[in-house]
Image: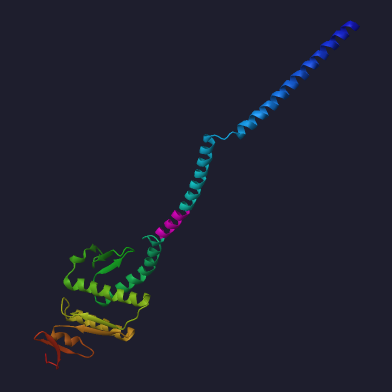
Amino acid sequence: MYNNMLSESRVTEQKRKNVKLRLDQLSSWQEELKVDLKAVEDIQTDFDDLINDTTERINNSNGNIDKYRKQISKLDIVKYIVSEEGVKSYIVNKLLGLLNSKLLHYLRKLDSNSICVFNEYFEEEILNEKNKVCSYFNFSGAERKSIDLACLFTFSDIRRMQGGVKYNIAIYDELFDSSFDEKGIELITEILQDRVQELDECSIVISHRKESVKAVTGDVIYLQKQNGITKRVDYVEL
């Protein structure tokens, strides 16, 4: 029995020694690996330089990309603001209601059967007395002249209301000389008189027809061209 126990003890001791030898060997290998790793880390190769340069370039490129993205974002904002859908469209839409109502007002005062409406792109749509869309050239000369004058008075009023420049004189060349009949000239005269009273506007109408003097409510100046020179002349009976 004691011999068996002794044998087992010897076997156990030998195993312990073998394990210690194995541990010592592993520790030695570990130290060698540390030395090798340190040597590898200390080695500087061209490939390492390439990696470092590439990494630096990537970082710089990412920085530039971020900068350009911010600039593009700002430009996109500016592009939207100045586009047809941006602030311009917002301002125009605010004025459209006033513009179209003024236009309708003058068309009614000129006894026109047509209605002219502008959209935000200043494209006109003209409706006849049957409320059908028509071309500008489908109307007679007097009707087209009424539309023209309504637009003229309307844009003049809008400019007066929205612009910073004030004026109180308007010159109309041959306003009574074409298209309008006596009734039309009377309606235009009423509008001019209203503008004189309400806007303190001085309206000067140039005409080559003596009959136009019948519509005049203010002073009349007669001019006559002789030998290429225009001179003021005395009153001439019609």
On screen, residue 135 above or below 168: above
User: How far from the left and from the top, in percent, is residue 142?
Assistant: 18, 73
User: Which is nearer the eye, 43 or 6?
Assistant: 43
| Residue 184 visible in rendering | yes
Find the residue positioned furthest to the bottom. 234
Looking at the image, residue 22 lies above or below residue 178 = above
Q: In screen coordinates, is 227 left or right of 191? A: left
The residue range painted magenta reads 70-80
Q: Position of residue 175 (x, y in %)?
A: 19, 79
In screen coordinates, is 174 left or right of 103? left
Count how many numbered circles sit on residues in the image.
0
235 part of magenta stretch? no
Q: Main secondary structure of the magenta part?
A: helix
Task: Please tell me which residue is depicted at 79% across the width and 14% down the height of the picture.
Answer: 15
Foreground of the two, 12 or 137: 12
Q: Quadrant of residue 108?
A: bottom left
The residue at the far left in this view is 227
The vertical placement of 226 against 24, above or below, is below
- Closer to us: 89 or 218: 89
Q: Is residue 173 left or right of residue 46?
A: left
Q: Residue at x 48, y 54 (%)?
A: 70
60 or 216, which is in the foreground? 60
Q: Quadrant of the C terminus?
A: bottom left
Q: In this rendering, does residue 112 appear at all?
A: no
Where residue 83 sits in the image (x, y, percent)? 37, 60
Asked if residue 74 lies in the magenta stretch, the reply is yes
> Residue at (52%, 45%) from the top-left corner?
59
